[in-house]
């Protein structure tokens, strides 16, 4: 059985892009989410099992923003057509649908704990 790769961080890092400090680690909700704008782009961040995830703030179904999505701690429920997406990996768990677009994340410790996101150049 072929395994589907939802997110390939190494492939993302090979694209020309830039690490950007976007938020203090303490401001990323555990088992919830926050949306922030970086330039013209909107990101959705969540902390699951102490690991931060960053997705595009854009539903994979019809590209509406997920800012007002509901969250049950593990999944986002899009307010428009109620597709459900895993906060763990961004896959759609309720319908046949592409996963949320996801970006590499790293935590920096100096001068304080911050979340950096690697955004491809076409997103900056
Ligand atoms: S736009 Fe999100 S489910 Fe349709």
Image (spheres, rainbow, N blue to C red):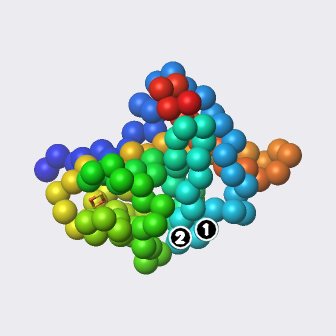
Q: Residue at x 39, y 45 (%)?
A: 101
**x and y percent of residue 98 in the render?**
25, 49
SS of the residue under disc 1: loop
Horizontal side of 99 relative to 20 (left or right) equals left
Tell whether circle 2 marks a residue whose Cβ is less than 8 angstroms from ligand 1: no
- Mark 2 neighbour class, 10 Å CA radius: few under 14, some 14 to 19, many 20 or more: some
Instruction: Tell me if residue 32 comes above or below residue 63 in the rendering.
Output: below
- Using the image as rendered, state which of residue 89 and residue 60 is in the foreground: 60
Q: Residue at x 59, y 47 (%)?
A: 37
Instruction: Tell me if residue 119 comes above or below residue 64 in the rendering.
Output: above
**x and y percent of residue 75 in the render?**
39, 69
Marks 2 and 1, Cα distance to the nearest angstrom?
5 Å
The image quarter in which residue 77 lies: bottom left
Label 1 belongs to which residue?
29
For residue 32, which numbered disc appears in the image?
Answer: 2
Tell whether circle 1 marks a residue whose Cβ is less than 8 angstroms from ligand 1: no
> Is residue 33 visible in this depiction of the protein?
yes
State if disc 1 and disc 2 touch (CB < 8 Å): yes
- Mark 1 neighbour class, 10 Å CA radius: few under 14, some 14 to 19, many 20 or more: some
């Amino acid at each position: 059985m072929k395994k589907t790769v939802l997110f390939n961080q190494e492939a993302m890092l090979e694209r020309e892009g830039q690490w950007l400090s976007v938020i203090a680690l303490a401001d990323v909700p555990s088992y919830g989410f926050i949306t922030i704008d970086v330039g013209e782009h909107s990101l959705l961040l969540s902390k699951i099992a102490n690991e931060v995830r960053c997705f595009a703030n854009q539903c994979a179904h019809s590209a509406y923003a997920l800012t007002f999505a509901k969250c049950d701690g593990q999944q986002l429920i899009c307010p428009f057509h109620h597709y459900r997406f895993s906060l763990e990996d961004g896959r759609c768990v309720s319908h046949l649908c592409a996963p949320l677009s996801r970006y590499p994340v790293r935590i920096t410790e100096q001068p304080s704990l911050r979340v950096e996101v690697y955004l491809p150049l076409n997103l900056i």
